[in-house]
Amino acid sequence: MTNNANDWLNEHGDYLYRFALARLRDPHQAEDAVQETMLAAIKNNSFEGESSARTWLTGILKHKIIDLQRKLIREQPISDLVDLDASETSMDDFFDKSGHWLEKPQFLEMPENALQQKQFLSILNTCLDKLPAKLSAIFMMRDVHESDNENICKELNITATNAWVMLYRARMGLRKCLEIHWIAG
């Protein structure tokens, strides 16, 4: 490892880890993604100083995260392909025959203090973990990373229609889980 790589790790390692952890929600995967980023930076030292080292390393990390998400989706267990939970209500239970809400979703106010916010984020992560891996990934890509639909379709190798259906299912699953565990809880 060169001095430059040591400097990058010392200066940007914590930031890169937090960045990866926020997107992957798994400490081990986040560590692996940062290690892969540093290895790629050392191996293909193409840093020319046109941007900051942090920006350059974050760009590499983003690609490593996308590669990891693709791998996880390809290796998705069959049990994840089953709908959210057969014992829970179906999405049809939220709508009448004309497609209108039976009961409008409750308004979620932003938590006022840090404790409530931490509790909410913990419950949100739990709810994301309950979703099938592909639904969780598409929700994170679209609503957290703010990727556009065209890039999501390319990365996940799905059609635009399939992406919208999956995103709808992810949002509905999260809504239901949050209503049960956050709003009612």
Image (spheres, helix red, strand yellow):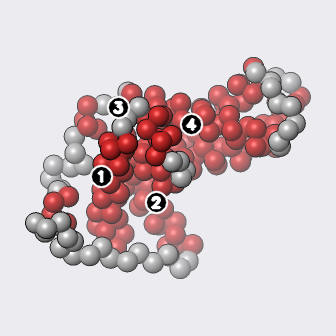
Whole-number angstrom distance, CA of label 2 to CA of label 4: 21 Å
Q: What residue type is labelled 3?
A: Gln
Disc 2 secondary structure class: helix
Label total for image: 4
Whole-number angstrom distance, CA of label 1 to CA of label 2: 21 Å
On residue 122, the disc is: 2
Q: In this view, does 160 lie to the left or right of 78?
A: right
Disc 3 secondary structure class: loop
Q: Nearer the viewer, residue 137 or 156?
A: 156
Q: Residues within 10 Å of mark 1 (few under 14, many from 20)?
A: some
Label 4 belongs to which residue? 65
Comes first in the chain, label 2 or label 4: 4
Label 3 belongs to which residue? 76
Label 1 belongs to which residue? 169
Whole-number angstrom distance, CA of label 2 to CA of label 3: 23 Å
Comes first in the chain, label 4 or label 3: 4
Whole-number angstrom distance, CA of label 1 to CA of label 3: 17 Å
Nearer the camera: disc 2 or disc 4: 4
